[in-house]
Amino acid sequence: MYRSNQFIRKSHGPKNLTHLHLYWHDTVSSTKPSSVAVRPPRNNATVFGEVNMFDNPLTVGPELGSELVGRSQGLHAASAQDQIGLSMAMNFAFTDAIYNGSSITVLGRNAISNAVR
């Protein structure tokens, strides 16, 4: 609730913290890729303009064959002209245990040249 230039915090019960640690696998080159280009790039150096759709597995471990906990489904577009940077919109759709049927939506920038992001 917003009133006269100040924010008023309302309590809606106890707060819970959940720490998610998972791996997102993006396979672009195989007989069955999980990410495909739907629009080719305009600039080959930064792939500016390329748009991809994806349906990627989310797993417990870094190996593709580790336990599947859900899918990441969405799109990313190369939106930077002077570097490789993506604008992403995706849903993490969970299929495992207590989170089965839950989802998280992520919208933002992905600086793919960073090792951890």
Image (cartoon, rainbow, N blue to C red):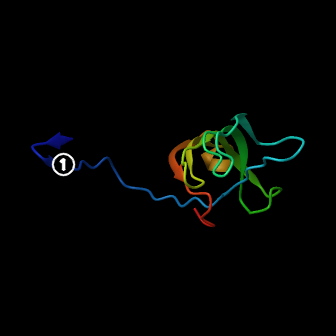
Residue at left offset 67%, top offset 40%: 41
Quadrant location, the C terminus: bottom right
Return the residue at label 1: 8
Q: Is residue 9 left or right of residue 76?
A: left
The number of callouts visible is 1
Q: Residue drawn at (19%, 49%), measured in percent from left and top?
A: 7
- Could you tell me residue 44's position as x and y percent? 69, 47
In the rendered image, the vertical position of residue 62 relative to residue 81, given as above or below: below
Residue in the foreground of this view, choosing between 55 and 70: 55
Q: Measured from the top left, where is residue 2 in percent x and y?
A: 18, 42
Quadrant of residue 91 in the image? top right
Q: Amino acid at mark 1?
A: Ile
- Image quarter in which the N terminus is found: top left
Q: Quadrant of residue 84?
A: bottom right
Q: Residue furthest right?
A: 31
Q: Circle 1 — which element?
A: loop
Q: Position of residue 113 (x, y in %)?
A: 62, 62
Q: For residue 60, what is the image quadrant?
A: bottom right
Q: Residue at x 83, y 56 (%)?
A: 65
Q: Is residue 108 left or right of residue 90?
A: left
**Is 23 placed above or below 40 here?**
below
Query: For this rendering, which residue is in front, 59 or 76?
Result: 76
Q: Position of residue 116 (x, y in %)?
A: 60, 66
Quick check: 81 left or right of 96? left
